[in-house]
């Protein structure tokens, strides 16, 4: 009864078109099997036990699948309890069966977004942080360039956390800001207003000229 699993043929024949590496394919198959076994949120350790990959490799593979939008983390509500996480391969199945193969390339600007966040935070992103970025991209339809700009403003303001970046993006969206240039102009006006209300404490004041240079980079 349990000696076979059902895998879509398209996954085996078309995974390269989705940008999935062989190690990622193995991880997908293991997650699928874990789901069949009743484990909806396997840890890197558990995946490692079934493969030749180390736990660290499994963590990197899971992060990569999340970054590519092929895997998501969902909240399961069981017995009126909240907080039961699970991995879902639904985005993978949707891309596999609904999107023409020639359109399944991840934009380079989006792909570079995750390494930039990890560089600024000085550590690998957690699955939930990766999912947060994917929400900005997919649900909020934020442009990668604007997310990049919001991250850099958070760095300059010394408030490097996802809640602050989310507030920046929501504020820009509310004001109809859609380009990096508009964000730069908005930031300039904001700081001009701030300057009128602050005393001349130049020794401790941040050099905001960096803000403009950073936003102008592409």
Image: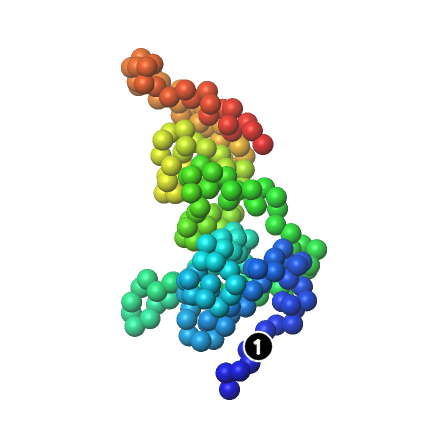
Residue 140 in view, yes or no: no
Between 120 and 180, which is closer to the camera in this rendering? 120
Between 91 and 52, which is closer to the camera in this rendering? 52
**Residue shown at 51% from the left, 68% from the top:** 30
Between 130 and 195, which is closer to the camera in this rendering? 130
Q: Give the answer, above or below, for where 52 lies relative to 189.
A: below
| Residue that sits furthest to the right in the current view | 102
Q: Give the answer, above or below, for where 181 lies relative to 54.
A: above
**Residue shown at 51% from the left, 60% from the top:** 53
Q: How is the image coloured?
A: rainbow
In the rendered image, the quadrant that contains the C terminus is: top right
Q: Give the answer, above or below, for where 174 lies relative to 5.
A: above
Callout 1: 10 Å neighbours few (<14), some, many (20+)?
few
Q: Is residue 76 left or right of residue 54?
A: left
| SS at circle 1 | loop
How far from the left and from the top, in percent, is residue 85? 38, 63
Query: Where does label 1 land, which residue?
Result: 6
**Residue shown at 34% from the left, 19% from the top:** 205
Between 139 and 212, which is closer to the camera in this rendering? 212
How far from the left and from the top, in percent, is residue 1? 51, 86
Residue 164 in view, yes or no: yes
């Amino acid at each position: 009864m349990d000696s076979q699993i059902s895998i879509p043929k398209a996954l085996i024949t078309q995974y390269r078109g989705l940008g999935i590496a062989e190690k990622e394919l193995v991880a997908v198959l293991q997650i699928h099997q874990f789901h069949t076994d009743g484990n909806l949120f396997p840890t890197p350790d558990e995946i490692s036990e079934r493969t030749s990959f180390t736990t660290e490799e499994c963590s990197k593979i899971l992060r990569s699948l999340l970054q590519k939008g092929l895997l998501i983390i969902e909240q399961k509500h069981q017995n009126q309890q909240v907080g039961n996480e699970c991995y879902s391969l639904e985005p993978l199945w949707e891309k596999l069966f609904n999107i023409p193969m020639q359109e399944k390339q991840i934009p380079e600007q989006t792909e570079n977004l995750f390494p930039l966040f990890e560089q600024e935070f000085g550590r690998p992103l957690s699955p939930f942080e990766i999912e947060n970025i994917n929400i900005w991209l997919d649900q909020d339809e934020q442009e990668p360039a604007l997310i990049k700009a919001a991250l850099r403003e958070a760095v300059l303001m010394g408030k490097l956390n996802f809640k602050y970046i989310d507030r920046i993006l929501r504020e820009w969206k509310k004001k109809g800001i859609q380009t990096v240039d508009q964000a730069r102009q908005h930031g300039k006006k904001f700081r001009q207003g701030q300057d009128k209300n602050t005393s001349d404490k130049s020794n401790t004041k941040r050099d905001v000229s960096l803000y403009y240079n950073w936003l102008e980079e592409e």
